[in-house]
């Protein structure tokens, strides 16, 4: 029974840890998104500053295309990074659910073992009844 209690406790702890990891990953995804948007704005600002220093026309189609390319690339990088972090959070949540279910299953096993122990204790009483012959191992 002590082994089952230990397993149940370990599964509960692992479930709790996985849930905390998932919450942390969600916060990390939000932070990465915010940082990525700020960095994208900085990159465009840097490009505009360099263009102004070189006396380039900011309304030219070439400048617009370059600006658009910078924005697109930065946004794709942000989305890719945030997606990866969110997937990790989802995996952590699934792990938490699994460990929680395993803890519950182990708790149920403890009850079955306790019931079997009771039957083992009263089995000798039934051994003296004629015609009733069973053995609990």
Image (cartoon, grey):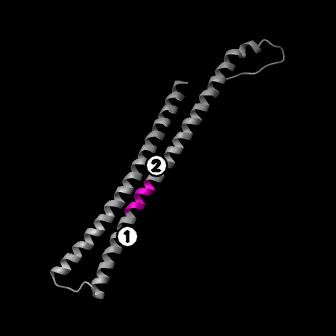
CB contact under 8 Å: marks 2 and 1: no
Q: Please determine whether, in this image, residue 64 is positioned above or below residue 90.
A: below
Viewer-closest of 108 and 113: 108
Query: Left or right: where does residue 136 sit relative to residue 71?
Result: right
Q: Residue at x 57, y 33 (%)?
A: 106
- 52 within the magenta span: no
User: What residue would you read off at disc 2?
Assistant: 92
Q: Residue at x 33, y 78 (%)?
A: 68
Q: x%, y% of residue 101?
A: 56, 40
Image quarter of the C terminus: top right
Q: x%, y% of residue 97?
A: 53, 44
Q: Secondary structure at mark 2?
A: helix
User: What residue would you read off at disc 1?
Assistant: 76
Choose top left, top right, bottom left or bottom right for residue 136.
top right
Q: Please determine whether, in this image, residue 125 is positioned above or below residue 67.
A: above
- The boundaries of the magenta stretch are 81-88
Q: x%, y% of residue 99?
A: 51, 41
Estimate the spatial distance between the alpha carbons at disc 2 and disc 1, rounded to whole Å. 24 Å
Image quarter of the N terminus: top right
Secondary structure, magenta segment, majority class: helix
């Amino acid at each position: 029974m002590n082994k089952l209690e230990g397993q149940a406790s370990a599964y509960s702890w692992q479930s709790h840890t996985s849930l905390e990891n998932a919450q942390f990953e969600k916060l990390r995804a939000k932070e990465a998104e915010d940082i990525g948007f700020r960095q994208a704005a900085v990159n465009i600002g840097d490009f505009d500053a360099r263009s102004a220093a070189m006396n380039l026309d900011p309304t030219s189609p070439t400048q617009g295309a370059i600006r658009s390319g910078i924005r697109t690339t930065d946004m794709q990088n942000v989305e890719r990074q945030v997606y990866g972090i969110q997937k990790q959070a989802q995996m952590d949540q699934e792990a938490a659910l699994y460990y929680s279910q395993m803890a519950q299953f182990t708790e149920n096993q403890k009850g079955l073992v306790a019931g079997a122990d009771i039957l083992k204790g009263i089995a000798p009483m039934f051994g003296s009844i004629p015609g009733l012959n069973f053995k609990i191992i």
